[in-house]
Amino acid sequence: MTDTLRQSGFTTTADGAWWRDAAVYQIYPRSFADSNGDGLGDLPGITSRVPYLKELGVDAVWLSPFYPSALADGGYDVDDYRDVDPRLGTLDDFDRMIEALDAAGLRCIVDIVPNHSSDRHVWFREALASPRGSAARDRYIFRDGLGDDGELPPADWVSTFGGPAWTPVGDGQWYHHYFALEQPDLNWDNREVRDDFLETLRFWSDRGVAGFRIDVAHGLAKDLPDILPSQAELDALPIDGSHPMWDRDEVHEIYAEWRELFNSYSPARTAVAEAWVEADRRGRYASAEGLGQAFNFDLLESDFDAAQFRSVIESNLALSEKSGSSSTWVFSNHDVVRHPTRYGLPPVDGRQVRQGAEWLLSRGREPVVDVDLGLRRARAATMLELALPGSAYLYQGEELGLPEVADIPDVDRQDPTFFRHQGTEIGRDGCRVPLPWTSAGPSFGFGTAAPHLPQPAEFGRLSVEAESGDSDSTLTMYRRALEIRSRLREGGLEWMETGNPQVLAFRRPNGWVSVTNFGDELYELPDGELLLSSSPVVGGFLPGAATAWLQG
Ligand code: GLC
């Protein structure tokens, strides 16, 4: 299919920079919609819900991995980068999904996982069957073990999901995996690895995807010395471009090559880096010579606090101007505690975010969540986010105000974090529970079978069906907010004096004013027509934990 056809439903392709102020909706495909009753969401399920996405008012979707995978890490362990997991559909289903999205004017971004393949990838199987020093092993990071027969790991490194980061293969050699042992790290010094990913990017670009989300983008380039440092030594090294593992300067050579490929398409393909790096080093990932955009998780990592929000917004707007990119704003994704729950947790040392992280990591000490406060704050934060210049990345289910699901039985849990910590860390399954589409039914309309992660009873009340007809629902708020945003989103922002340190207000060039009250006292709104508010405005007063938009 040609690009012209692919673009048929688009409205803002002229400069190819649609992504600068897009609202992008992240779909975790296995938990979105199940069309064939096997308990797993799939691509035809997504296709069937395109009208919902259109009505919601987002500009694009980003699909977490849908590739063949043993699901050792929710699909981020990829067996084959150029195919669809048969449980999720076929390449034809993918084409049909793109066609349906195109017809609705929605673009599609897919997830690329270049730091590691799965251990079932044909290359890794070949590496295991090949001797040390072979070309097959050079595609990964193999090292001789220590001890007389290599029976000891090359270093004491710990993987991010817990447990060792080096695993023996039985002949004295060990391979490196920063994540689960089913996710061997690829060797990006190997030309074949680089060429193969270029082919993958071409493969999906040719199939009509508009861009890519790059997983662990700051990890690809590595330079491991012959004598490996200990984990403690590694942790003590500065991450300033010279660290053996993270955010090395050479990683940008890889992205410069990718950029050339992206720009060979019309419109140019876009990319967004998942790069957990220092704010001032994010710009290189986001530059026009690089991936084009980088996630900024600073708001996600902030408490519901006016001063923190203001400083994050100011610094990120300045950084994006410097890099020539646009800011990205995120509150929830498939890796973190959903924001209504985070904001409803009692603070630890005055910080909700830290509490959220501890909650994710803890077991048996789940604190009481103030559900009402958490949701009010989350709605206020989202409206503030949607009023900001730049692009907003929304995670499926946040438009319903879904909470994190805490009480998933151990037998149903899937996240390697849970297993690798012998159950002491509860992991990320609680934000990946399948979406409720209807108020009743065996899986609240997700499919006809039991869903692959159990849904709590309250999901009926939070379903698309229940919220669609309710003018006060979170879904209605998202729909209205996205519609207003799509009309008014041009230009930068100007801060307004509020006379109250708990209240942030800013104006966009066309008179769109956003006011957020982070405190608990009523705040008198400035003059202007009320467009929307996250909680009811009574007599011109904005309650605490609320945002209002005005046309000034
Ligand atoms: C990224 C993904 C996360 C995954 C990890 C390893 O951080 O967002 O879900 O577990 O990479 O691929």
Image (cartoon, rainbow, N blue to C red):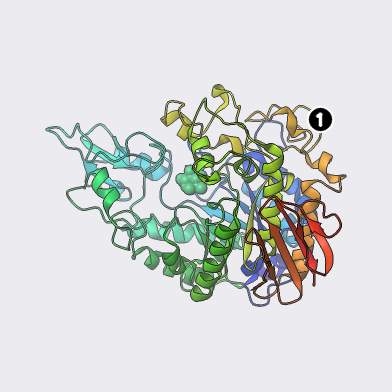
The answer to which image quadrant residue 495 occupies is: bottom right
Q: Label 1 neighbourhood size at 10 Å, few (<14), some (14-19), many (20+)?
A: some
Quick check: 343 above or below 214? above
Q: In which quadrant will I find the C terminus?
A: bottom right
Residue named by callout 1:
440
Q: Is residue 505 left or right of residue 271?
A: right
State the count of labels.
Answer: 1
Q: Is label 1 within 8 A of ligand 1 (CB to nearest ligand atom)?
A: no
Q: Is residue 419 left or right of residue 91?
A: left
**Residue found at the very far left of the displayed protein:** 148
Q: Quadrant of the N terminus?
A: bottom right
- Left or right: residue 434 compared with residue 193: right
The answer to whether residue 51 of the structure is visible from this angle is: no
446 and 551: which is toward the camera: 551
Q: Nearer the viewer, residue 464 or 10?
A: 464
Q: Quadrant of residue 525?
A: bottom right
Q: Position of residue 386 (x, y in %)?
A: 69, 61
Residue at x-position 68% and y-position 59%? 384
Residue 244 drawn above or below residue 265: above
Q: Nearer the viewer, residue 159 or 86?
A: 159
Which percent across, then down, holds residue 315? 52, 67
User: Horizontal and vertical percent for residue 297?
Assistant: 53, 55
Determine whether 328 is above or below 507 in the image: above
Q: Position of residue 418 (x, y in %)?
A: 47, 31
Q: Decide if residue 490 is in sight here.
A: yes
Residue lying at 79% horizontally and 42% vertically, measured from the top left: 464
| Residue type marked 1 | Ala
Q: Quadrant of residue 411?
A: top right
Q: Provide the secondary structure element on which disc 1 rests.
A: loop
